[in-house]
Image: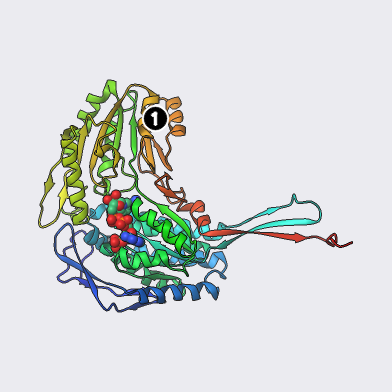
Amino acid sequence: MLDFTDRATLPDAPREFGFWSDGSWRKGRAMFERRSPGHGVAVTLTPKCTVDDLNAAVAAARRAFEDRRWAGLPGADRAAVLLRTADILRRRRDEIAYWEVLENGKPISQARGEIDHCIACFEVGAGAARLLHGDSFNSLGDNLFGMVLREPVGVVGLITPWNFPFLILCERIPFILASGCTVVVKPSEVTSATTLLLGEILSEAGAPDGVYNVVTGSGRTIGQALTEHPDVDMLSFTGSTSVGRSCVHAAADSNFKKLGLELGGKNPIIVFADSDLEDAADGAAFGISFNTGQCCVSSSRVIVERSVAREFEEILAAKMAKIVVGDPLQTKTQVGAITTDAQNSIILGYIDKGKAEGATLVAGGQALDLGGGQYIVPTLFSGVTPAMSIARDEIFGPVLSSFHFDTLEEAVSLANDTVYGLAASVWTKNIDKALVVTRRVRAGRFWVNTIMAGGPEMPLGGFKQSGWGREAGMYGVEEYTQVKSVHIEIGKRAHWIK
Ligand code: NDP
């Protein structure tokens, strides 16, 4: 029996999962072995599904949508399923956090906090299921009444990445289900376990068969097939901008499925001289180190007023040196392992590029080999110029670049000097500056004197090449609906043929 508490240890043998389709576990014919990035040992075996498995799951989702076993329920009944799911998640919190840590490498205390957020997502989703409504037009004249109905889009394909396997899933699933849609999920092959577990949890909570389905396997086979599937009405994709682009092509080449895309970011954090520099440095250290910087809203560019730049960077470097990097199963760990070998090489490659392009390494910069896992110490580069690759590319690791500015105009211009527009923050005690910068920086999520704060009531999504659409809250549930304009004649219609 595995222990999921603070005494958690590694499993003796990898846990084998089936895939979840049409309300039950299905056996995979071939399996993918996942090794814990923090420990180097095999922890899970998940199915390498075939395109036939995917087709069967889409067919199950289609049946569950068309016979109205889900969409036809009152919103209150869908809400009850989502609330029961929240209760089960509360009970199984430490267990889900455990598998998340073993497959992803994130610290256990962070993973548990993420499950708490997921519980909140289901509770907000339950509220959304009851509150979702359309509109009416009483302004079309005495003979016509207009209603705008919100209807579920249909079968949704959901592709999620490996950086927040359960959290990104739960920022979408409650809102997809609240709308009345059914779903087929393709998680990243390296982090599928918790997405699969949600199948049995939703079923225990009372979700009808076929409403939630999970098909595991690689992005190139199963993911690509899902994007091209002619019987999927909408695709929600979170991941790299390059695969996001291929989703747009696939949607156009198949059935013009509706798309929601949350893609990359190169997020600025603007620090004015009048801010509380200790607070801002703590926010910057957290913003780049949280989830090992493998986070689409990581604040990877700090843009600091020149008059305090040296002082700020000293405070920041001292804070970064105190971050506890290590075994993700230890509760004191703040920064865990890098999730994939490929990502580890990408990050170390950018650290080398930063040095080669002439930036000054102020903190970190080294890889650690702790107990068979792969770790990178949070890293700060100063003297970064806009043309450098560490200034432009989404590194997706704990590598922070520092830029200096003299005027507010320059700060805003540096902040907007990116193809992305996912998130940003400003740190100042001056309300006018805070509001001007809030209005002028092009980003879907914005924080003033804080960072990565919020809740599932608030919408998530990006400007520019960071994506299309919004997830979570009422904005999120509405993305999974389409509106129908209904026109009702009152009394006798005036005849066309006299
Ligand atoms: P991807 O975009 O390749 O992966 C995200 C998801 O898409 C995974 O489930 C993946 O499956 C799937 N996928 C991969 N290829 C396809 C395809 N052709 N069609 C459909 N689905 C596909 O990201 P990577 O894992 O390769 O990471 C690369 C970079 O992407 C990172 O360095 C980072 O910059 C960015 N990224 C951004 C994220 C964000 O939250 N905005 C999240 C993850 C990455 P599988 O993993 O099984 O191959």
Q: Which residue is mark 1?
A: 412
Q: Please tell me which residue is depicted at 24% across the width and 48% down the height of the picture.
A: 292
**Residue closer to the observer: 128 or 395:** 395
Where is 44 relative to 259, above or below?
A: below
Q: Is residue 18 visible?
A: yes
Percent x, y of residue 20? 36, 73
Q: Quadrant of ligand 1?
A: bottom left
Please say if 113 is above or below 103: above
SS at mark 1 in the image: helix
Task: Give neighbour class at mark 1: few <14, some 14-19, many 20+ (Cα, 10 Å).
Answer: many
Q: In front here: 55 or 109?
A: 55
Q: Report the colour scheme.
A: rainbow
Q: Is residue 16 left or right of residue 488?
A: left
Residue 356: percent from left, percent from top? 16, 36
Q: Check mark 1 vs ligand 1: CB closer than 8 Å? yes or no.
A: no
Percent position of residue 322, x then y: 17, 39
- Mark count: 1
Residue under the image location 33 percent in, 63 percent down: 187
Residue 92 picture quarter? bottom left
Q: Residue type at mark 1?
A: Val
